[in-house]
Image: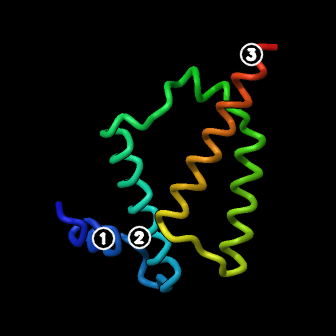
Amino acid sequence: MTVKEIVLDSIQNLPSDVTYEDVLEQVAILAAIERGQQAARAGRVLPHDVFKELDHAAIREQLRLAQEDIDAGRFLTQAEMEEEVASWNAESLRRDALEKRQ
């Protein structure tokens, strides 16, 4: 299916009283799923045992801060967002490696 077909199909399944915000959220979810699938196809994934070792409290805090930015109308470009996520992952993995050495 093309992106257009996927989006149209998804929107058709929303309730009749859908808002513009609901539609935007649905498209954002579809885009996030596609980015995740692309990352998986490119091998940019973490094995489950590595994921379990991540500092989930720090990740939750980053997500909370990101939600505050969204709520305040501060948005990042796709490139800026990818750079932020990469830095979070690198920092978390670095911290984990240091903790294991101690």
Q: Are marks 3 and 1 in contact (CB under 8 Å)?
A: no
Q: Counting other residues with Cα less than 10 Å from the Cα at mark 3, is it few (<14), some (14-19), or many (20 or more)?
A: few
Distance from the alpha carbon under mark 2 to that under mark 3: 40 Å
Given the image, on which type of amino acid does mark 1 rest?
Val
Q: Secondary structure at mark 1?
A: helix
Q: Secondary structure at mark 2?
A: helix
The residue positioned 68% from the left and 31% from the top of the image is: 94
Q: Counting other residues with Cα less than 10 Å from the Cα at mark 1, is it few (<14), some (14-19), or many (20 or more)?
A: some
Q: Is 75 on the left or on the right of 66, as rendered? A: left
The residue positioned 41% from the left and 82% from the top of the image is: 16
Distance from the alpha carbon under mark 2 to that under mark 1: 7 Å
x%, y% of residue 34?
35, 54
x%, y% of residue 85?
58, 51
Q: Are marks 2 and 1 in contact (CB under 8 Å)?
A: yes
Label 3 belongs to which residue? 100
Q: Quadrant of the C terminus?
A: top right
Please report whichever mark, 2 or 1, sits nearer to the chain's N-terminal start.
1
x%, y% of residue 22?
50, 77
**63 or 11: nearer the viewer:** 63
Label 2 belongs to which residue? 27
Given the image, on which type of amino acid does mark 3 rest?
Lys
Please report whichever mark, 2 or 3, sits nearer to the chain's N-terminal start.
2
The residue positioned 74% from the left and 16% from the top of the image is: 100
Label 1 belongs to which residue? 7
Residue 67 numbered mark, or none = none
Establish if 35 lies above or below 44: below
**10 or 39: nearer the viewer:** 39
Please report whichever mark, 3 or 1, sits nearer to the chain's N-terminal start.
1
Q: Secondary structure at mark 3?
A: helix
**Camera-side mark, 3 or 1:** 3
